[in-house]
């Protein structure tokens, strides 16, 4: 299980939270309860299983709902 | 394509605004109806594109967002060929979003400044004495790092070589230069004002104090109170509900105009953003002034505090006792003083230290047969003479007579709150010292400000003797003071206050994690940025500066007030608009959108006032 911290470009609307949450939680391998979107810091924190899903796929899911990923950090 | 449109949202807003201007000008000034309609249609299509994409993205993850409402409303306006409305509504929505983004960034600026202070690189010394610049992420625990004048300390570490003065503002909020020498601890993010030092990395990356502070502040800004979670849940069902309401209205009245107007008016904009904005601005202000408020729940509780309890006399005093009064009985002072100094300088006891400092440099005598009597004092032989230095109990126990004169001195000094040290030489009382801790400067003033902010009772709980505690209380105008208190008794006392219905804030130094700090609704740690203090309490004053306390309380109150104002504004606007749609003939989509976007800006601007908050000075 790895911990990811993903830095996004600034978030403005509160429905962003719901969108990003929805997009990441729907991925297999992401621990649903661990998903935390920090609105003001524009960060997503989540735990995921690296054997099921990659950080790249998680980033892609966020990009797909319309947000720009600046950088992400993964800690095992 | 989607990305391209979203990224150019602001340009699209500008273009659509321009087209609307063209449309109205050709209609009003030149009577060119054809041109006007075409311009407005293009403006609508341009404007709705990014909104519709966002709506689609939201629907894909099963969220009915505001974008969905607006997209349907604009679609409806198109169907009834009201291009004027569709153009203006999309423009206002985009322009509003732009302004929101701009102003929101302002409210977050305080935290951003903080995170931007994070060190980026370090200079590592290799084994052969070479230095190399490396990325901050590549620093490992145990690395030897060089910090030059003007540079940032990259990680938490210990000084191995050299010395200098460091500005620790990023940690303590106080820009005072602190001297560092070999063995001193230094913190990541602080700046070396002068000197050059070599440090050994103790903690790197996310483990540094600085990183922890940032993480804490970031989490605090997003932490939600019960009320906010309610609003969130509410908002989740609110938008689908508005959609449903508008559908029902349409089915009954067959009036598309009315149905789509309801869609726009029902947008929850200001309601969802109002409270978080106050929260962010308030916590941001605190972070800049060395006050960490851990989230909006804390702000809520803290703002309602009516009893403040201070743990230990040391919270209010400097913590280094000094000799306040001396009496010598019998002659030959010099010999007596030298004997006392010779014995006391061997002890670490704070009272002994106070006496040593008081006596200063004197000739020393030979001391032997030193015997430390726990809880009493010290007995020894100085140049062959027996000497006893200790409290009144010890002196009495050794059967030493206390003259009437000395007894009256003792009574007077005790009443003034002094700790007493008596000295007997060869079985005769020769000296009496009254030792007292000094009140921290400004504390009296700060306590008055706390009272002014609505704290009704200021209580001191201390392990010191009642006399000392009473004296401090009298001097500072505390409501109550209780001495001889053990940690369990303090906790019990706090529990008692809570049972009486008080909201208790407990101020401790955060070092010894007393149960009271956890028990009180608001635990306030006056730490110097230690991990324990940061983790165990609700509010952290980053340096032991007591004057931050009124700022913290005042800020919490101002923030709580600000949140309430924003909720009132947001709810008021929605109610006002929805009632207008049924009772007023002039209400339409465009005006509704204008009022909505306006109210969002109003709550953001209102929140921004908190960034400038300063506690009011006493007059």
Image: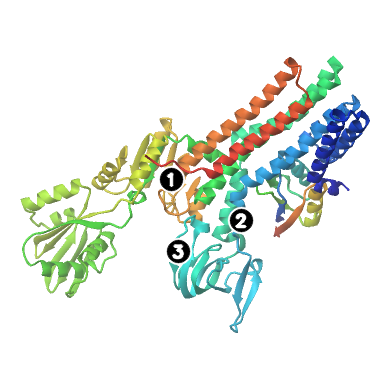
x, y percent for residue B260: 82, 25
Looking at the picture, does residue B216 appear above or below residue A17?
below
Colour mapping used in the image: rainbow
Q: Earlier in the sequence, mark 3 or mark 2?
A: 2
Q: Tell me what residue is drawn at x 64 percent, y 67 percent.
A: B136
Disc 1 versus disc 2: distance between alpha carbons?
24 Å
One can see residue B511 in this view: yes
Disc 1: CA contacts within 10 A as few (<14), some (14-19) or many (>=20): many
Q: Tell me what residue is drawn at x 29 percent, y 49 percent.
A: B464
Occupied quadrant, residue B233: top right
One can see residue B61 in this view: no
Label 1: chain letter: B
x, y percent for residue B358: 22, 63
Occupied quadrant, residue B47: top right
Q: Secondary structure at mark 1?
A: helix
Residue indicated by mark 3:
B177
- Check the image and name the residue furthest to the front: B30
Looking at the picture, does residue B401 appear above or below residue B143?
above
Q: Tell me what residue is drawn at x 79 percent, y 36 percent.
A: B91
Q: Is residue A16 left or right of residue B501?
A: right
Residue indicated by mark 1:
B549
x, y percent for residue B411: 14, 47
Q: Is residue B475 left or right of residue A27?
A: left
Q: Is residue B27 left or right of residue B558?
A: right
Q: Earlier in the sequence, mark 1 or mark 2?
A: 2
Q: Secondary structure at mark 3?
A: strand
Q: Secondary structure at mark 2?
A: helix
Q: Who is closer to the viewer here, B374 or B553?
A: B553
Residue indicated by mark 2:
B115
The reply to whether dot 3 and dot 2 touch (C-beta < 8 Å) is no
């Amino acid at each position: 299980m790895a911990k990811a911290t993903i830095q996004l470009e600034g978030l403005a609307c509160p429905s962003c939270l719901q969108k990003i949450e929805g997009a990441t939680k729907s991925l297999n391998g992401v621990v649903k309860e661990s998903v935390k979107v920090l609105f003001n810091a524009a960060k997503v924190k989540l735990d995921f299983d690296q054997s099921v899903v990659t950080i790249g796929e998680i980033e892609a899911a966020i990009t797909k709902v319309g947000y720009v990923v600046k950088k992400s950090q993964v800690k095992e | 394509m989607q990305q391209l449109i979203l990224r150019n949202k602001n340009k699209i807003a500008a273009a659509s605004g321009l087209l609307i201007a063209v449309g109205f000008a050709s209609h009003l000034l030149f009577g060119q109806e054809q041109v006007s309609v075409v311009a407005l249609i293009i403006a609508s299509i341009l404007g709705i594109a990014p909104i519709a994409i966002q709506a689609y993205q939201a629907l894909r993850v099963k969220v009915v967002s505001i974008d969905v409402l607006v997209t349907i409303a604009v679609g409806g306006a198109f169907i009834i060929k009201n291009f004027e409305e569709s153009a203006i509504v999309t423009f206002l929505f985009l322009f509003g979003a732009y302004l929101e983004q701009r102003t929101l960034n302002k409210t977050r600026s305080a935290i951003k400044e903080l995170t931007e202070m994070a060190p980026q690189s370090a200079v590592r010394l290799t084994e052969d004495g070479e230095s190399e610049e490396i990325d901050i992420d590549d620093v490992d625990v145990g690395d030897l790092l060089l910090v030059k004048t003007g540079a940032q300390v990259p990680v938490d570490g210990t000084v191995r070589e050299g010395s200098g003065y460091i500005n620790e503002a990023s940690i303590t909020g106080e820009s005072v230069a602190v001297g560092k020498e070999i063995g001193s601890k230094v913190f990541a993010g602080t700046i070396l004002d002068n000197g050059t030092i070599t440090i050994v990395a103790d903690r790197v990356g996310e483990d540094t104090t600085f990183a922890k502070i940032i993480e804490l502040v970031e989490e605090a800004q997003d932490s939600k109170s019960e009320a906010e979670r309610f609003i969130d849940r509410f908002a989740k069902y609110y938008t689908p509900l508005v959609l449903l309401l508008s559908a029902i209205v349409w089915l009954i009245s067959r009036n598309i105009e009315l149905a789509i107007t309801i869609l726009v008016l029902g947008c929850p904009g200001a309601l969802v953003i109002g409270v978080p904005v106050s929260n962010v601005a308030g916590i941001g202000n605190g972070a800049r002034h060395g006050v960490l408020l851990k989230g909006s729940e804390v702000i809520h509780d803290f703002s309602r505090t009516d009893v403040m309890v201070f743990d230990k006399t040391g919270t209010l005093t400097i913590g280094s006792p000094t000799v306040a009064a001396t009496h010598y009985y019998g002659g030959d002072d010099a010999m007596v003083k030298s004997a006392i100094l010779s014995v006391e300088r061997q002890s670490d006891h704070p009272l002994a230290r106070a006496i040593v400092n008081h006596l200063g440099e004197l000739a020393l005598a030979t001391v032997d047969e030193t015997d430390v009597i726990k809880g009493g004092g010290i007995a020894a032989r100085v140049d062959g003479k027996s000497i006893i230095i200790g409290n009144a109990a010890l002196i009495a126990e050794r059967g030493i007579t206390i003259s009437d004169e000395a007894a009256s001195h003792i009574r007077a000094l005790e009443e003034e709150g002094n700790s007493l040290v008596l000295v007997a030489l060869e079985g005769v009382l020769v000296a009496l010292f009254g030792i007292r801790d000094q009140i921290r400067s400004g504390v009296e003033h700060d306590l008055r400000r706390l009272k002014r902010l609505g704290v009704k009772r200021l209580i001191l709980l201390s392990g010191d003797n009642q006399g000392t505690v009473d004296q401090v209380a009298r001097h500072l105008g505390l409501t109550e003071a209780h001495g001889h208190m053990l940690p369990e008794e303090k906790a019990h006392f706090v529990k008692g206050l809570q049972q009486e219905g008080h909201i208790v804030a407990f101020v401790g130094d955060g070092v010894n994690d007393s149960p009271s700090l956890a028990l009180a609704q608001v635990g306030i740690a006056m730490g110097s940025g230690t991990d324990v203090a940061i983790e165990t309490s609700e509010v952290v004053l980053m340096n032991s500066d007591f004057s931050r306390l009124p700022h913290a309380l005042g800020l919490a109150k101002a923030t709580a007030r600000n949140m309430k104002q924003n909720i009132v504004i947001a709810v008021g606007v929605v109610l006002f608009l929805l009632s207008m749609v049924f009772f007023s003939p002039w209400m339409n989509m465009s005006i509704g959108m204008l009022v909505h976007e306006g109210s969002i800006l109003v709550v953001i601007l209102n929140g921004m006032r908190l960034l400038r908050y300063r506690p009011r000075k006493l007059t």
